[in-house]
Image (cartoon, rainbow, N blue to C red):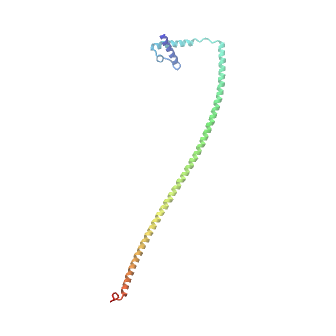
């Protein structure tokens, strides 16, 4: 019973492995969890049974072959018809998808053109504003320079006028002082000598 279990495990492992690769003693031993000796012995038996089963193919009766051919032809015809119908459906869907993509591409291109135009307009407007601001700054700078120059001229003129006024004022004070002295001298002359004291 234990031997049958080991054999069945080796056969099962070999069958699973043969679906994707050629089973070896090492792969079967690892997959079945058996010893190298058991894996080698039962793997050899498994291969022999597989090869003998392949060589024992009985001759197929003619009627079965004809029915199989008719069935295969019917299946093939149906497969071709189904494939053609699916091809039509797939081609239609592909064309609709291609049309949709072309429409999306055209819309994106139009949006890109619109965005590009708006960007160019915004750039032009900003350039105009910058130029106007620069011109205003230059004008303001020129006006400020002119105002500073005029202020300097006015300051010099005012200083000259103040200096001239001071000069006139000094002259006037000198004249008044001279006139006062002259008046005092005249008054002193015209007063009688004894006018100051009466007895």
Give the percent coordinates (x, y) of residue 162: 43, 71
Is 145 drawn above or below residue 101 in the view shown?
Answer: below
Identify which residue is drawn at 53% across, 55% down: 132
Identify which residue is drawn at 50% across, 58% down: 138
Quarter of the image that includes the C terminus: bottom left
| Number of dots carrying numbers | 0
Identify which residue is drawn at 38% across, 83% down: 183
Give the percent coordinates (x, y) of residue 155: 44, 67
Identify which residue is drawn at 37% across, 83% down: 184
Give the percent coordinates (x, y) of residue 6: 48, 13
Q: Determine which quarter of the picture holds residue 94.
A: top right
Q: Is residue 115 left or right of residue 9?
A: right
Q: Determine which quarter of the picture holds residue 161.
A: bottom left
Is 115 drawn above or below residue 96 in the view shown?
Answer: below
Q: Nearer the viewer, residue 159 or 83?
A: 159
Give the percent coordinates (x, y) of residue 36: 45, 14
Q: Nearer the viewer, residue 176 or 144?
A: 176
């Amino acid at each position: 019973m234990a031997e049958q279990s080991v054999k069945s495990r080796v056969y099962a492992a070999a069958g699973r492995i043969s679906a994707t690769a050629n089973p070896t003693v090492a792969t079967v031993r690892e997959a079945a969890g058996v010893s190298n000796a058991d894996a080698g012995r039962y793997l050899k038996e498994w291969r022999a049974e597989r090869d003998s089963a392949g060589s024992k193919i009985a001759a197929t009766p003619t009627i079965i072959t004809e029915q199989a051919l008719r069935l295969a032809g019917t299946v093939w015809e149906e497969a071709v018809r189904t494939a053609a119908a699916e091809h039509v459906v797939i081609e239609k869907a592909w064309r609709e998808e291609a049309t949709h993509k072309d429409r999306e591409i055209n819309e994106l291109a139009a949006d890109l053109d619109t965005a590009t135009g708006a960007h160019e307009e915004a750039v032009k407007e900003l350039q105009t504003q910058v130029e106007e601001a620069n011109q205003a700054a230059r004008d303001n700078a020129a006006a400020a320079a002119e105002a500073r120059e005029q202020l300097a001229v006015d300051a010099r003129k005012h200083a000259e006028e103040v200096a001239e006024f001071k000069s006139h004022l000094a002259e006037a004070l000198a004249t008044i002082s001279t006139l006062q002295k002259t008046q005092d001298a005249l008054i002193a002359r015209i007063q009688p000598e004894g006018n100051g004291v009466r007895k």
